[in-house]
Amino acid sequence: MSITENITRLRASLPAGVTLVAVSKFHPVEALQEAYDAGQRVFGESRAQELTAKQKVLPGDIKWHFIGPLQSNKVKDIAPFIHTIHSIDSLKLLQEVNKQAAKHERTVNVLLEIHVAQEEAKHGFSPDECRELLRGLAPDALPHIRISGLMGMATNTDDTTLIQQEFHTLHTLFTELRDSVFKGNSHFRELSMGMSHDYPIAIREGSTMIRVGTSIFGEREY
Ligand SMILES: *Cc1c(COP(=O)(O)O)cnc(C)c1O
């Protein structure tokens, strides 16, 4: 099936209120253009260099999301245009995004990445580290970022019960924070979870943003 067919079907199957981030890493700009022509406007990339190269040549109304591990020294390259960064895993990174966004008089949406999977290799805060970070953050400390929610990845496994439990844990933390630290703050509303193989489970567990690559663009060539 073509990218156009994949994206049209996928979008039609999503409940209202779930945003599709088309994960286009490692795919050529022609593939992104096809998705764009099919109506897709939100794209996710995981490497700063690849992202900035694509951003230069693709239409200006695309909302670019950064979803991969982000080094502090790369923030300045994406700060002029990035819409949302899903992969905030330290206070230092949060401060750097604020600083670079300020230089461009922009506000960047950020999601705090939460580690719930069993693999050590995955990044992110534990739920307790996340609570602690937020407790220590003065409300106006970082005016050029907007903490819009949480992001997480489930363990890469066929055990759907485990995946479901991990997404449930993320959703529980999300609602806890929304109703406490972020009470009255309408910006804190996104729960980014679900990829090609597990997004239906993620949606059942309350995801508002799914990050899907392979099911749209096919296998990646590395
Ligand atoms: C690559 C990637 C995805 C998309 O994965 P698919 O299995 O191709 O859908 C989603 N989230 C993150 C963080 C990724 O790095």
Image (cartoon, rainbow, N blue to C red):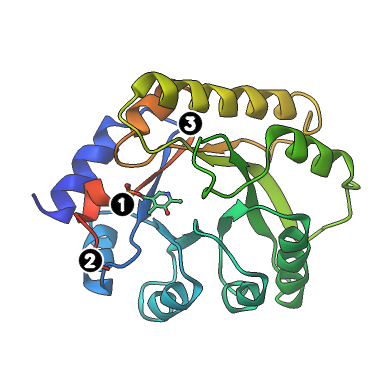
Mark 3 / mark 2, whichever is N-terminal = 3
Q: Residue 219 occupies which quadrant of the picture? A: bottom left
Q: Residue at x 28, y 39 (%)?
A: 11
* Alpha carbon separation for disc pair 3 and 2: 28 Å
Q: At numbered mark 1, what does the secondary structure look like: helix, strand or loop?
A: loop
Density class for disc 3 (Cα within 10 Å; few <14, some 14-19, many ≥20) is many
Residue that label 1 marks: 213
Density class for disc 2 (Cα within 10 Å; few <14, some 14-19, many ≥20) is few
Q: Quadrant of the C terminus?
A: bottom left
* Relative image position of residue 113 (x, y in whole percent): 61, 45
Q: Nearer the viewer, residue 137 or 61?
A: 137
Q: At numbered mark 2, what does the secondary structure look like: helix, strand or loop?
A: loop
Which amino acid type is marked by label 1?
Gly
Mark 1 / mark 3, whichever is N-terminal = 3
* Alpha carbon separation for disc pair 2 and 1: 12 Å
Q: Nearer the viewer, residue 68 or 120?
A: 120
Q: Residue at x 17, y 53 (%)?
A: 4
Which amino acid type is marked by label 3?
Ser
Furthest-front residue in this view: 120
Residue that label 3 marks: 207
* Alpha carbon separation for disc pair 1 and 3: 17 Å
* Relative image position of residue 107 (x, y in whole percent): 70, 61
Mark 2 / mark 1, whichever is N-terminal = 1
Q: Residue at x 71, y 65 (%)?
A: 97
Q: At numbered mark 3, what does the secondary structure look like: helix, strand or loop?
A: loop
Determine whether the beta carbon of the residue marked 1 sits less than 8 angstroms from the nearest atom of ligand 1: yes
Residue that label 2 marks: 221
Mark 1 and mark 3 in contact? Answer it, CB < 8 Å.
no
